[in-house]
């Protein structure tokens, strides 16, 4: 197997020779601002796949590279440092949410049908988890799937679904029974069928990548269940652990590199920054992240620790954006994207589990505190 050093060196060389000028250098500082050119993002994802830098940990028979998780973490680091979209772009739901669900709980037919198309950006996915009355309390969802022989009929509403207006498929958590946890089932839903309405949500940033999804008598065959009936909560927990780790890496490096940039600008402009405490927090979290990498090297699984990484990184990124907007004039940093980023960063402590929910999870699962 290739060494970590050689993998990192090869990746840096590939980025140097292949990064599109229109994409490079943006995501370092503006992780919270999405790109608008979707076809360019689709082409970029295909290029990453063809180079072997997507699906790094996936089995080779499904289009992956079969490498250890440490190599995927290195890829996140290097693409973020280069300011290039990786993981969190047009295909992010398919890569970070759907693939772990299917790889860990799906059947062979689902793996061969969907996974290679996710890697090649042939299918775009959205996520149907949160609902208007069930955001952080995911287990209280009301969208219902009624069994009718060889298929289910689904009715309900989902909200905050990224890229639903572009998606071919949705991974959907729905209620199939009355038990709070065992009454949930995970489905694959074709977004192009009758009975599905998508309504974009305009955000404070002016963008509308989030959507509401309305489902009325939507027919889903039993073959589209991921796992078994009643396994939905187990599948959702697999998904969220993976998502929080990937998001946490992105936010940590975005905060770290953004603060380095602000220090450089402050020195040039003669602006005094009182950032020792913020720097210490970022370095402390980076040390924690390195401990997680050592777990991966040993073949251990990252579970509840991903909640710590995502929780702290999301709040640190907010602090960096606030510092930029408070301390710098609009023209002294880059442009209005810092302000948009500050507004958008508020959502980073909500997505993939609110800070409050993650603190509860850490208290109960890691610190063993009572509920």
Image (tube, rainbow, N blue to C red):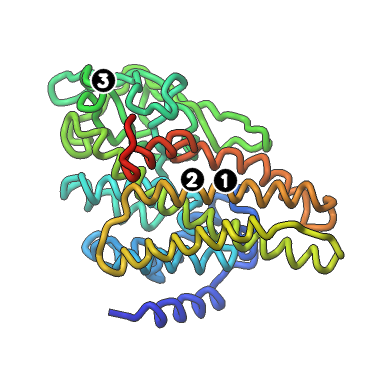
> Residue 302: x and y, percent?
32, 55
Dot 1 crowding, Cα within 10 Å, few <14, some 14–19, many 20+: some
Q: Earlier in the sequence, mark 3 or mark 1?
A: 3
Whole-angstrom CA distance, mark 3 to mark 1, is 40 Å
Residue 123 visible in the picture: no
Vertically, is 123 above or below 361?
Answer: below
The answer to whether the residues at label 2 and label 1 have Cβ atoms under 8 Å apart is yes
Which of the two residues, 289 or 118, is positioned nearer the viewer here?
Answer: 289
Q: Is residue 331 left or right of residue 361?
A: right
Label 3 sits on a secondary structure element that is: strand
Which numbered tag is attached to residue 133? none
Which of the two residues, 56 or 150, is positioned nearer the viewer here?
Answer: 56
- On the image, numbered disc 1 is attached to which residue? 315
Which of the two residues, 238 or 21, is positioned nearer the viewer here?
Answer: 238
Vertically, is 144 above or below 53?
Answer: above
Whole-angstrom CA distance, mark 2 to mark 1, is 7 Å
- On the image, numbered disc 3 is attached to which residue? 153
Residue in view at x 71 percent, y 46 percent: 322
Residue in view at x 37 percent, y 61 percent: 292
Label 1 sits on a secondary structure element that is: helix
Label 2 sits on a secondary structure element that is: helix
- On the image, numbered disc 2 is attached to which residue? 311
Residue in view at x 20 percent, y 45 percent: 106
């Amino acid at each position: 197997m290739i060494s970590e050093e050689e993998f990192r060196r090869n990746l840096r060389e590939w980025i140097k020779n292949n990064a599109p000028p229109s994409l490079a250098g943006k995501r370092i500082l503006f992780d919270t601002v999405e790109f608008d050119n979707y076809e360019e993002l689709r082409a970029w994802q295909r290029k990453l796949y063809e180079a072997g830098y997507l699906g790094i940990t996936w089995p080779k028979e499904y289009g992956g590279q079969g490498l250890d998780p440490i190599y995927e973490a290195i890829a996140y680091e290097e693409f973020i440092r280069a300011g290039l979209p990786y993981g969190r772009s047009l295909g992010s739901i398919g890569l970070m949410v759907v693939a772990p669900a299917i790889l860990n709980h799906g059947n062979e037919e689902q793996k061969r049908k969907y996974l290679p198309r996710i890697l090649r950006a042939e299918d775009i996915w959205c996520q149907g988890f949160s609902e208007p009355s069930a955001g952080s309390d995911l287990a209280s969802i009301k969208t219902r799937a009624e069994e009718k022989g060889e298929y289910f009929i689904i009715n309900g509403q989902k909200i905050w679904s990224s890229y639903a207006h572009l998606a071919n498929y949705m991974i959907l958590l729905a209620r199939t029974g009355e038990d709070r946890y065992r009454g949930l089932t995970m489905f694959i839903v074709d977004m192009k069928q009758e009975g599905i309405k998508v309504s974009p949500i305009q955000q404070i940033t002016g963008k509308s990548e989030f959507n509401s999804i309305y489902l009325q008598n939507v027919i889903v065959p039993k073959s589209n269940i991921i796992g078994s009936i009643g396994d939905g909560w187990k599948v959702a927990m697999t998904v969220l652990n993976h998502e929080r780790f990937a998001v946490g890496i992105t936010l940590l490096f975005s905060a770290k590199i953004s603060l380095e940039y602000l220090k450089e600008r402050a020195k040039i402009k003669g602006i005094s920054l009182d950032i020792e405490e913020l720097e210490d927090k970022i370095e402390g979290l980076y040390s924690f992240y390195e401990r997680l990498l050592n777990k991966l090297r040993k073949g251990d699984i990252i579970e509840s620790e991903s909640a710590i990484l995502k929780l702290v990184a999301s709040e640190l990124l907010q602090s960096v954006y606030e510092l930029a907007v408070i301390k710098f004039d609009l023209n002294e940093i880059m442009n209005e994207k810092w302000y948009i980023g500050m507004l958008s960063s508020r959502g980073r402590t909500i997505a993939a589990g609110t800070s409050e929910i993650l603190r509860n999870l850490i208290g109960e699962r890691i610190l063993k505190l009572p509920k």
